[in-house]
Amino acid sequence: MDCPFCKIPAEKFITESELAFAIGDIHPVSKGHSLVIPKVHTENYFDLKREQKIACWDLVSELKVILQERYNPGGYNVGLNINRIAGQSVLHAHIHIIPRYSGKSGGNFSIENMASKLFSE
């Protein structure tokens, strides 16, 4: 197995728990873009055990506090891609936490824009 997430040294962690850790994304879409990653290699979020999912979401909440203190964003996008067809580039389950800032382009993501694109095709 050649998983880049399994090779990340602990000194790179922003924060961690027994079952998960958080790091900065190496290709951030905004300042503070981070990932929460389960420590046990599991390709698909839906294959994680219940306690791993809980640990990941607890860390998302902890990371939000850290990012808020550090960068003071106006909002967040939080989500995950599951399998390559959905945009998952590293096949190790992970959750994106993307801070958003007033006046900054964030890819113009909104539910309204997504719905508009879906129904116009």
Image (cartoon, rainbow, N blue to C red):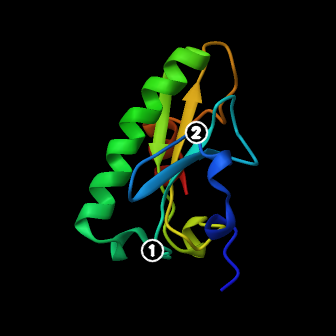
Residue behind mark 1: 44
The amino acid type of the residue labelled 2 equals: Ile
Where is residue 20? Give x, y as percent. 44, 56
* Residue at (50% x, 45% y) in the render: 114
Disc ID at residue 16: none
Q: Is residue 14 visible?
A: yes
Horizontal relation, residue 9 to residue 112: left or right? right
Which residue in the rendered view is the most extreme toward the right? Answer: 27
In the picture, the quarter occupied by the C terminus is: bottom right
Compare marks 2 and 1 and give the one earlier in the sequence.
2
Q: Amino acid at mark 1?
A: Asn
Q: For numbered disc 2, what is the local secondary structure?
A: loop
Q: Is residue 65 or residue 84 the one in the foreground?
A: 65
Q: Outermost residue, bottom direction?
A: 1
Residue 112 seen in the current view: no
The residue to which callout 2 is attached is: 14
Name the element at disc 1.
loop
Q: Position of residue 82 (x, y in %)?
A: 48, 68
Neighbour class for label 2 at 10 Å: few (<14), some, many (≥20)?
some
Up/down of 50 relative to 113, above or below? below
Question: Vertical placement of 41 versus 58: above or below?
Answer: below
Total tally of numbered discs in the picture:
2
Which percent across, then down, holds residue 64?
45, 30
The answer for how far apart the CA atoms under marks 2 and 1 are is 23 Å
Front one among 121 and 80: 80
- Name the residue furthest left: 50
**Quadrant for the N terminus in the image:** bottom right
Q: Tell me the quarter of the picture where residue 70 sits.
A: top right
Q: Residues within 10 Å of mark 1 (few under 14, many from 20)?
A: some
Q: Quarter of the image holding residue 102?
A: top right
CB under 8 Å between discs 2 and 1: no
Picture residue at 46% right of the left edge, 75% below the top = 42
